[in-house]
Amino acid sequence: MPVEAPSAEKLLDMYARMWCIRLFEEQAEYQSSQGKVMGALHTYIGEEGVAVPVCAHLQDTDYITSTHRGHGHCIAKGADISRMMAELFGRSTGYCKGKGGSMHIADFKLRGNGQVAVCFFGDGAANRGPFHENINIGAVWKLPVVYVCENNQFAQWTPQKDVTLVTDIANMSPAYGIPGVQVDGMDPLAVYEAAGEAIARARRGEGPTLLECKTYRFHGHNFGDPQQYRTREEIAEWSDNRDPVKQMAAHLRDAGILSDEQDADIQNTVQEEITAAVRFAESSPYPTPDELYKDVYSYDIG
């Protein structure tokens, strides 16, 4: 079933969210370099063209699961960037009260009816047992799930081609009897259309889809990664010619939806929101010692 073309308003909102991810991640890297964000930091820069168009189809009650690069997923789903920044800063006003940090931002919701779950994962996860176990049971039970592989071609510091003969993850879908779709992850509109079809299929009760988005991260696996496994020329080729934010802007301009003035306003507004988020985080208190054992799950082993 064809996906309805997004409205001009939705396209502009998607563009603004892509900029929000880009600038949030740049600010997170800066704050990490200043010692204000502790622990590993994995940015989503370069992959904005996947999460934003996918999540544009989701409702507030739908779920997503995330990966190392979860900031982009959270922003795409509509998370509050001030609470996100506070979590990175380890403050009590963060989503996980400052206890989770960069890799564990989450906003737990109650289950309802007619919901869809989107599972984001990288190409490296496709070589692991939990991926195959999960996709198999999802197929058997016809769960309303869309498995979105953000294939950025590197599992941490290892090129995908060095560890698997099957570099097109979508080709794994026939083994589980579900549709497999491959799309250019640097083209937000192509992702929007493919994700819309997969999510609608899940809502109709027709089971999961494996959606592979061929993408590329512009920065290292984590902040400080020397990136000895790829060349500067390769990175420049992708960032200069395939940037999903630039591609989205070009489409909006060609369609007469985005003017230079609007573009500047969007970027300035997002930058002000990021600055406000940093101020919120810096002014928020750290968790107190009595919070140490709160929100910790436990069970009686008898």
Image (cartoon, helix red, strand yellow):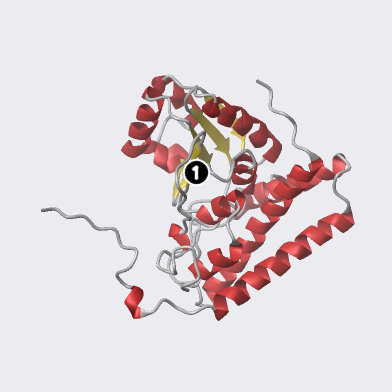
Above or below residue 68? Residue 280 is below
Residue at 66%, 72% (x, y): give it.
Answer: 276
> Residue at point 89% right, 42% down?
256
- Image-based side of 222 in relation to 216, left or right: left
Secondary structure beneath label 1: strand
Q: Is residue 92 above or below residue 57?
A: below
- Left or right of residue 69: residue 4: right
The image position of residue 161, as x and y in percent, is 46, 37
Q: Is residue 136 above or below residue 70?
A: above
Q: Which residue is identified by label 1?
A: 63
Residue 227 versus residue 32: which sits nearer the camera? 32
The amino acid marked with disc number 1 is Tyr
Q: Percent position (x, y) of residue 37?
A: 49, 72
Q: Whole-percent x and y of residue 218?
A: 60, 53
Question: In the rendered image, which quarter contains the N terminus?
Answer: top right
Q: Residues within 10 Å of mark 1 (few under 14, many from 20)?
A: many
Q: Nearer the viewer, residue 266 or 233?
A: 266
Indicate the quadrant where residue 260 lies.
Answer: bottom right
Q: Residue at x 61, y 53 (%)?
A: 78
Using the rendered image of the protein, determine whether residue 129 is visible from the camera's viewpoint.
Answer: yes
Question: Is residue 244 found left or right of 68 in the rendered image?
Answer: right
Q: Is residue 168 visible?
A: no
Please name the residue shown 74% across and 43% down the image.
Answer: 10
Residue 47 horizontal/vertical position (percent): 60, 48
